[in-house]
Amino acid sequence: MEGFPVRTAVAVALALAIATRSFRHRSLDLSGAITGFLVMAIHIAAGYRFGALLLVFFFTSSKLTKMGEEKKRKIDEEFKEGGQRNWIQVLANSGLATILVVVFVTVIGGQDTCLDTKRSKLFTGLIGGIIGHYACCNGDTWSSEIGLLSNAQPRLITTFKTVRKGTNGAVSVEGLLAAAAAGLVIGLTSVITGSLAAADCSTDAVWKQLLLIPIATIAGLGGSLIDSLLGATLQFSGYCTVRKKVVSNRAPTVIKISGMSLLDNNAVNAVSVLLTSFLTSAVCLYIF
């Protein structure tokens, strides 16, 4: 736990500054800013690798959300100026990772090292799960935001028929490439920050960490595909003839496009994150 008090002080100060700025710039509403502060503080205090993964996801996704706002306003049913994520959205995209981070600090003691099952299966599994978590979140966000701005007509993942932009479960080539790129960024972040913070790693183990880059890239793409599949089947999409938008609730003026009304967008995100985290953790346990 060496360095933990210093990290905690840095974590509180940095998380407060970022949460305040995000609230002022409308990236988060008040509930999202308060929850975001707690989540950021926990991540950074636990380790700089975890803080970096969260912040890379948050800043890149927030930046993309604000791109092309005028175009997205015409398409997105739930469009909010600046993004304005609330506490539910914050937890849907960071809740599981926060739990894994707390387990890491509580059980392992907070010392970052290389992924290596010979040293610790628990550490390797936890880090793999956290990387999978943020690769999935980043991949889904990049895919959705870039997909909305694309000139290409998306296709429903279950039927491959063209559908309107904003339809849950719709995919495009640009969106899928963006998801893979988003995962790659998470993998790079983990390798760079992990190599700086890791202790007592053999030379072979250090070089093997580079495998996290393709693993995270696949997790970003795979997580986006899982999210799309869930959205196309378990989340309702319909076209409102009055608002001229794709909506997620049934109404007399809404023509069904796809899906059942079993999950909302936050639930779809949470389930896809859970599945991707578990699968990435299992892959890391197998490879490392």
Image: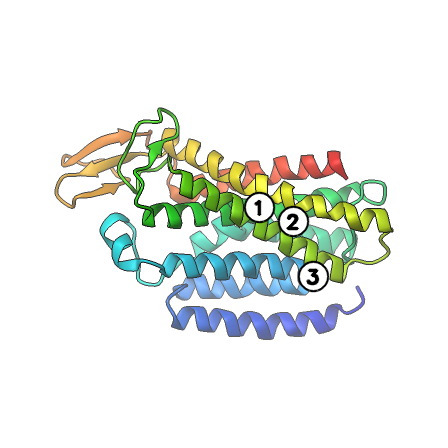
The quadrant in which the N terminus is found is bottom right
Three-letter amino acid code of the residue under disc 2:
Leu
Q: Which mark is residue 177?
A: none
Of all residues, the one furthest to the top in this rendering is 159
Choose top left, top right, bottom left or bottom right for residue 160.
Answer: top left
- To which residue does mark 3 refer? 47
Three-letter amino acid code of the residue under disc 1:
His
The answer to whether 79 appears left or right of 223 in the picture is: left
- Front-lying residue, 172 or 136: 172
The quadrant in which the C terminus is found is top right
Query: For the residues marked 2 and 1, what is the alpha-carbon distance in whole angstroms?
Result: 10 Å
Pinpoint residue 255: horizontal percent, then vertical percent: 19, 32
Q: Which mark is residue 100?
A: 2
Secondary element at tag 2:
helix
Q: Is residue 64 visible?
A: yes
Pinpoint residue 185: horizontal percent, then vertical percent: 57, 52
The answer to whether the residue labelled 3 contacts the one labelled 1, judged by CB atoms less than 8 Å apart, is: no
- To which residue does mark 1 refer? 133
**Rendered view: 64 above or below 13:** above
Crowding around mark 2 (Cα neighbors within 10 Å: few <14, some 14 to 19, many 20+) is some
Discs 2/3, front = 3
Query: For the residues marked 3 and 1, what is the alpha-carbon distance in whole angstroms?
Result: 16 Å
Choose top left, top right, bottom left or bottom right for residue 120.
Answer: top right
Secondary element at tag 3:
loop
Q: Does label 2 or label 3 sit earlier along the sequence?
A: 3
- Front-lying residue, 44 or 222: 222
Q: Does label 2 or label 1 sit earlier along the sequence?
A: 2
Secondary element at tag 1:
helix
How many marks the image carries: the answer is: 3
Q: Can residue 123 be seen in this view?
A: no
**Rendered view: 47 above or below 104:** below
